[in-house]
Image (spheres, rainbow, N blue to C red):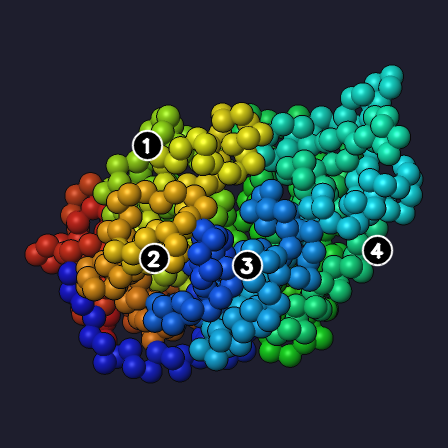
Amino acid sequence: MTSPATSDLDDAALSPSTTGAEWWRSAVIYQIYPRSFADSNGDGLGDLPGITAHLDDLDALGVDAVWLSPFYRSPQKDAGYDVADYCDVDPLFGTLADFDDLLAAAHARGIRLIVDLVPNHSSDQHAWFQAALAAAPGSPERGRYMFRDGRGENGELPPNNWESVFGGPAWTRVTDPDGAPGQWYLHLFDTSQPDFDWSNPEVQGEFRRILRFWLDRGVDGFRVDVAHGLVKEDGLPDYVPPADAGSMGGGETSVPYWGQPEVHEIYRDWNTVLAEYDGDRALCAEAWLPTIEKTALWVRHDEMHQAFNFEYLETEWDAARLRAVISESLRAYPAVGAPSTWVLSNHDVVRHASRLALTAENPQGHGIGPDSPGKPVPELGLRRARAATALMLALPGSAYLYQGEELGLPEAIDIPDAARQDPTWFRTRGERYGRDGCRVPLPWDADAPAFGFSPTGRSWLPQPADWGSFARSAEAADPTSTLALYRTLLAQRRARGLGTGSLEWIDAGDDVIAFRNGNVTVVANLGAVAVAVPSGRVLAASAPLGDGMLPPDTTVWVASD
Ligand code: GLC
């Protein structure tokens, strides 16, 4: 592989895309899933000091910002997305002082930090929900959540037919203090995650307080969990999902719990809260919606700043489809004044080093395990993943990376049943494997216990035995590694301002994606035969180039200067 000269990267840190206003328009944001990143105290679960200790690695990688998945007080029924106290750190992860240290250390390196906000539901251990259980139907305590009487003669049937995203019914009946069966409460996710009632001003006020708590501490913004779900349709009507409905977004126009128009009022309100603070704080929506056009409604000028581009993530390895989704993204988001974002992996989907080589249908959230059909060939998956990332990082806008993808980590497929932890696995009685396979703790050091994840060798999910070859220590020493590729791509992207650039398509044949962004020409070959590499200086290539030709499943960046 041709390596880029390093001399043209020296001024990379001064790029306006990271220091200027509205940094989020072009930032590369690295998602840390704290429980699986680095464990400093040896309990087998990652923690905040573990992250602080590895910030230099992220600096060397060249990311602009970090998004931290939840680290708040939580019984961990859904890996922290079940929050019992929004303004404290769970002892599993450390303390508020550890958080402040992490934030200061990130800022000292010029890395911004956004945190996860989970407003759709709390944990059932949250003080408000415990008070609601102890209070009577119709009380203000119950009014913060979605309690309803059951249907049927004795209220023995749930209030409607909604299903939990994790499988099974979306309602659970409570037992009253006197032991009698009582009302039902709504939980779009696990039983342990009761949905708030967002029409209640007390809930609205509480979340303004929570936003300010973290903004006062200095965070640069929030990734907003289930941002399309907070408002439910009046009267909570039954819903019969069509066959093509995705569990998080629905496949058609109207789902009574996703994408209700009133939800936008909430984000307009939050936008004004963020505007009280200096320094460009940002909101990013996790909103699974059927089209880019609809998702763009979440990032109008007075709402959120970014939304995850799940349409892009869900597009298969197909040139025509990818061209179409890129074109649509670069039309629809700028049309409302927002940047497009790009993302290939996160803690809820099969890692793209496996997903892009699956040969059977695999709906989001189902995961893959030992008995899944269409399991990927690992070499093909990694090859495509490297090509896909090289394509993504050349696109204008902001890009999200998920921890471990810079090592080329595949999905962990052979996790023993007894070790699985995702509520999806339990709620579907093993019918869906769920998301554990993308959450396995990172390998840092090929020769250390737990590959350096934890000083004691403990690991909350077992790591595949062959992950030593993916360890950062091994890849850092290998110029052809996936880590080396990511470093090159990120440095060149920053030095050449690709995030703030614009895209001009080049016609290069059906199976080839080719475009110019500034003085960089990008060609991705998704076909079965090699194509010519454009003339110019090769800045990066996702696989070795043979005789001036670009092999299948390979992306190249060529400079014309
Ligand atoms: C979001 C999170 C996911 C979580 C769910 C419920 O989709 O990304 O991990 O399980 O919300 O909070």
Q: Label 2 amino acid?
A: Gly
Q: Earlier in the sequence, mark 2 or mark 1?
A: 1
| Residue identifier under label 2 | 452
Which quarter of the figure has residue 485? bottom left
- Choose mark 1 or mark 3, whichever is in front: 3
Q: Earlier in the sequence, mark 1 or mark 4?
A: 4
Q: Residue at horizontal 62%, vertical 67%?
A: 96
Separation of disc 4 and disc 3 at Cα?
A: 29 Å
Q: Earlier in the sequence, mark 3 or mark 2?
A: 3
Separation of disc 1 and disc 4 at Cα?
A: 48 Å
Q: Residue at horizontal 67%, vertical 36%?
A: 191
Which quarter of the figure has residue 359? top left
Q: Label 1 amino acid?
A: Lys
| Residue identifier under label 4 | 202
Pointer 4 with pointer 3, Cβ within 8 A: no
| Residue identifier under label 3 | 93
| Residue identifier under label 1 | 375
